[in-house]
Image (tube, helix red, strand yellow):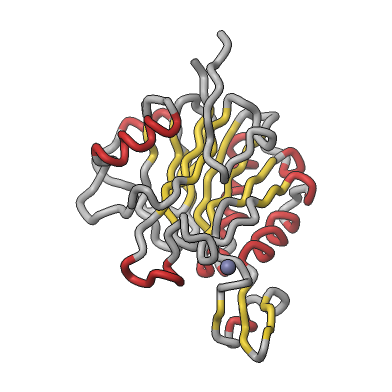
Amino acid sequence: MTLPPIRLMMTVSNSIFPANIIAFTSDRTVDFTLHQEQTGLNDEEEEFLSRRLHIDLPDLVLIRQTHGFRVVVADESFLRDKSVLPEADGAMTRLPNVVLTIRTADCLPVFMYDPEQKGIGLVHVGRRGAEKNILREAITQMKAQWQTEPKAITVFLGPAIRSCCYEVDKEFQESFPEDLVVKDGRHYLDLVQVCRKQLIGLGLEGQNIHDSGICTCCDEQYFSYRRQGESAGRMLSLMMLREG
Ligand SMILES: [Zn+2]
């Protein structure tokens, strides 16, 4: 069966992943902040996604992010229990029509695809996740669970705060000695470069790592914690293998 074309948002390129993969980051039309008691999407969120993506949302993997380094494997047994959201900052699956999700407002959504094993992963990387190298955890799990070859993995780096805007204390130099940009005596962290280097260190090919280039702080169509402070909402990133 031929799948109908999907109109994706500007942050995701059809040319990076095959057409049966949906990889998407929302803008600030809808605030996807995860509330305390919430275990699913609300009507507004569902309506927005089905309008933008023209899909049903069959099996949805929601996680409660902790800036840790846990990556959940969304297999059949995982999907059976939806009573509590697992605390994690990434998810992966080889099951079709299972929707991985993360929420960000400056942190980096990292979309991963193993074309050989037909697996996908979606990881939330902020400064703390980068320090803990959550990307290593994700790649390690893909290797252990699926025998993934890192050099086969294709990555898309979504919208995130960039070194143009991510001013940090110079103490960050201890954690990221090579990834601070100094301008006029101020220090800026290049989180995307940190992640790119971590991925290459894990065996990925530089040519397979694609970057949206979007700064959430510069581009006002996105939520940005740095620009908006506590009132910033959250974007939803989602990834799924589509089989129709
Ligand atoms: Zn910027």
Residue 90 rendering spot, x and y as whole percentages: 48, 49
Q: What residue lies at 31% left-to-right and 41% top-to-bottom?
A: 45
The answer to whether residue 81 is left or right of residue 123 is: left
Q: Where is ligand 1, by quadrant? A: bottom right
Q: Image quarter for residue 47?
A: top left
The answer to whether residue 179 is left or right of residue 4 is: right
Asked if residue 33 is positioned above or below residue 227 in the image, the reply reads: above
The quadrant of the rendering that contains the N terminus is top right
Q: What residue lies at 62% left-to-right and 51% top-to-bottom?
A: 157
Label tally = 0
Residue 195 rendering spot, x and y as whole percentages: 65, 60
Residue 199 rendering spot, x and y as whole percentages: 69, 55
Asked if residue 242 is positioned above or below residue 154 in the image, the reply reads: above
Residue 220 rendering spot, x and y as whole percentages: 47, 60
Q: What residue lies at 63% left-to-right and 38% top-to-bottom?
A: 13
**Residue placed furthest toward the left:** 37
Q: Image quarter for residue 58?
A: top left
Depth check: 37 or 109 in front?
A: 109
